[in-house]
Image (tube, coloured by chain):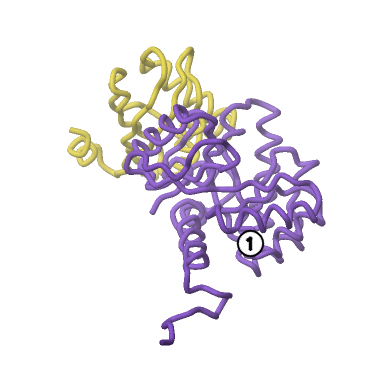
Chain colours: A yellow, B purple
Amino acid sequence: MKMEKKRHLLFKLHRLGPPVIERHLVSAIRSSLHTLYGEVCVATSKLYLDEYDSTNGEGILQCNLENLNEVVAAACMLSRIEETEVSFQPLKLSGSLRSLKQTSH
Amino acid sequence: MLIDFNVRADTSESLAEMLQAARVLGFDAIAVSNNTRINLGKEVSDIELLSRADITSRSIRGMKTQAGQHRKRALIIAAPLRGVLTANWAAEDSRVDLLTLHTDKTQSRLRKTTAKLAAQNETALEICIDPLLHTWGLQRSKIIKTYREAASVARDAGMPIVLSSGASRPLSLRSPKALQFIGTALGMRFQEAKKAVFEIPEAIVSRNRHKMSEGHIAPGLEIVQEGQ
């Protein structure tokens, strides 16, 4: 079985309203991805949150390289999660988690 | 220089909020329509404020008058993509920089002929992403269809594309990188979307600044040194 390449994205979630919890964020991105690109894309994207701080909105998400554009586009098109108005900002992309952690800290 | 070509602010307070949000997202400049009563000449923060004029007239005659009135004051002039005749006129007129795509396909359709004329005159197609953020389901898929078709026609004709936010609230602004990724959802290749956000807006601004400089007389004709 061919090894799938992963990518890690450092992001910041700007918000107006109460903090967005991790579960709601992942669910909103998956929902947006599902609406825009369908079930197959959600299934193959292997989208996970590596890290997320709900207070400052910074986090790292992980997905398949093949579906990277779709995942980030879907996240950037989010405008509201629950009662919070949001704006997703992709900051830095990397193949390894370590280099992103060095950037974020 | 990273520029968001389409920011809407009705009051000085909302403009200040927009400027702050744009700075946080990494923009160097934003263009705000000068149809509002805000004094755009005021220096606010370290973000450059560019003046934009939107042509509102529906007749060619009215559009010509407005273009003439705005050209000396506004750095960017945008015309809506409506009927064939007005769109073709705007595409041909060198004073118009942007043809703004409407979300309704019945009102706003980019024809191949218009795109070819626009490509010859370096008039860009402007796609605002704001309607995509505030719609859902079938309504959004209709907008995506309109945008994807127009982007495809523009690409085939060699017409430049500009991606802008069209935001009227700070959280409707998207960072340059986010706009690039959203561009891929509109059928643009990653590098094309990058050009639409990072290169074309800057090229339009520097071209117009050159046009509006004192020495410029006409394309290819400028005063390089004054005689004694």
Q: Pinpoint residue A58: horizontal percent, then vertical percent.
A: 30, 27
Secondary structure beneath dot 1 equals loop
Q: Residues within 10 Å of mark 1 (few under 14, many from 20)?
A: many
- Furthest toward the front, the residue is B228
Left or right placement of residue A84 versus residue A55 in this view? right
| Quadrant housing residue B227 | bottom left
Given residues B216 and B21, the one toward you in this image is B216
Quadrant in which the N terminus of chain B is drawn? bottom left
Left or right placement of residue B162 versus residue B63 in this view? left
Given residues B167 and B189, the one toward you in this image is B167
Q: Pinpoint residue A57: horizontal percent, then vertical percent.
A: 32, 24
Quadrant in which the C terminus of chain B is drawn? bottom left
Given residues A56 and A60, the one toward you in this image is A56
* B176 versus A43 height, above or below: below
Identify the residue shown where x is 52% and y is 62%: B208
Q: Pinpoint residue B159: horizontal percent, then vertical percent.
A: 63, 62
Total numbered labels placed on residues in the image: 1
| Quadrant housing residue A16 | top left
* A59 versus B190 height, above or below: above
Q: Amino acid at mark 1?
A: Arg
Identify the residue shown where x is 71% and y is 44%: B56
- Furthest toward the bottom, the residue is B228
| Quadrant housing residue B114 | bottom right
Chain bearing tag 1 is: B
Given residues B223 and A91, the one toward you in this image is B223
Q: Pinpoint residue B60: horizontal percent, then vertical percent.
A: 79, 55
Identify the residue shown where x is 63% and y is 51%: B78
What residue is shown with label 1?
B95
